[in-house]
Image (cartoon, coloured by chain):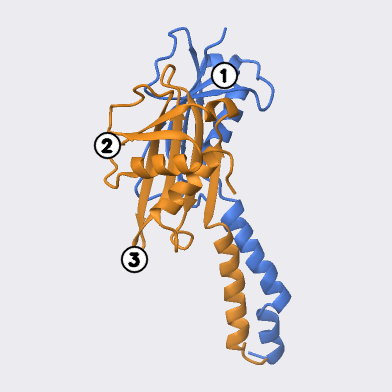
Amino acid sequence: MRHDEVARAKPSGAQSVVLILAGLAVGLGGCGMRVDVTKTDAGRLATPREEGCSVRFFNDTASLPATCEARARVTLGDTGFSVSCGTGDARRHLRRLACEVAGDTVVTKSRNNSMSTCIGMEATILRCEQ
Amino acid sequence: MPARSPRRILGRLVFGCAGLLAACVNTSGDPLTPSAIARTYCVEHQPADRRDFHVQVAESMRAEGLDARAAPAGECPGDDDYRVTYQDRIAWDLRLFLAKFTIFVEDPATGEIVAFGESNQDSIGAMGSSHRGVVDRAVRELVGRGG
């Protein structure tokens, strides 16, 4: 290999820094959690509420009124590369989705995955206030 | 072209590791409202917990000025206003470390989760942190004094 080819193949110091930063950005910021959403017919037809709307969270042992209507079922978990995947991230996703399907209540159930530090969660979005 | 010096390689490694370390510990939470902070809390032992984290959570909450007590499973809330539960995730990486700790505060009358605090750390982020230190971080998020 000629000397100038070697120089072309190896990145300069500045290029290396850019590459490292790009790798960190993808590795740390670009890997959110997996969110699978199944909307019910009522959820699909609902007029969305305003962004950041008020949503109440319950665990799966709570007894909610029978009049609550399911709007969507959501599964959250690890993509295998997820970084931003704590309870706060999960609740942000669920709040956004609840507003989207005009829900006001979210019932969550944790799913443990011993291979991942990401939260695993199943949630049902409901509309309880008529 | 001259070979890269070990010092230059080391510099890049340190730079890369510094970036990774910055994300090794993260906390999040929906803090208690000011009116809830004046109430009483019952921290319930969770069946899967073999380390008695409920005692540490109650101690940490008291250190933050909350009126909290620890209780065996099934005995909360008793006379207290809120039931406190938690989830811990122990991971292994040449040693056992507390990778995730989440505290939930529930209104026993409705089952609503009124607040939570969480601390996540990977193996590097957990270095130098005791279990109690991780619990303290989660409790600080719970009371709105997190980092």
Q: Label 2 is placed on what type of residue?
A: Pro
| Image coordinates for residue B31, horizontal then vertical, percent | 56, 35
Q: Is residue A51 left or right of residue B38?
A: right
Disc 1 on helix, strand or loop? loop
Q: Which mark is residue A103?
A: 1
Q: How far apart are marks 3 and 1 (CA)?
A: 45 Å
Crowd around label 2: few <14 · some 14–19 · many ≥20 (10 Å): few
The local crowd at label 3, few if under 14, some if 14 to 19, many if 20 or more residues have their Cα within 10 Å, is few
> Mark 2 or mark 3, which has the lower sequence index?
2
Determine contact: label 3, label 1, CB under 8 Å.
no
Q: Colour of chain A?
A: blue
Location of mark 2 (residue): B47
| SS of the residue under disc 3 | loop
Q: Nearer the viewer, residue A67 or B142?
A: B142
Residue in the image at 55% along x and 43% along y: B28
Q: Quick one: which chain is orange?
A: B
| Disc 3: host chain | B
The residue pinned by badge 3 equals B94
Q: Name the residue at 57% across, 19% down.
A: A103
Q: Which x, y percent locates residue A9?
A: 66, 80
How far apart in space, not on screen, are marks 2 and 3 (Cα)?
A: 26 Å
Chain under label 2?
Answer: B
Check the residue under mark 1 and report the chain it is in: A
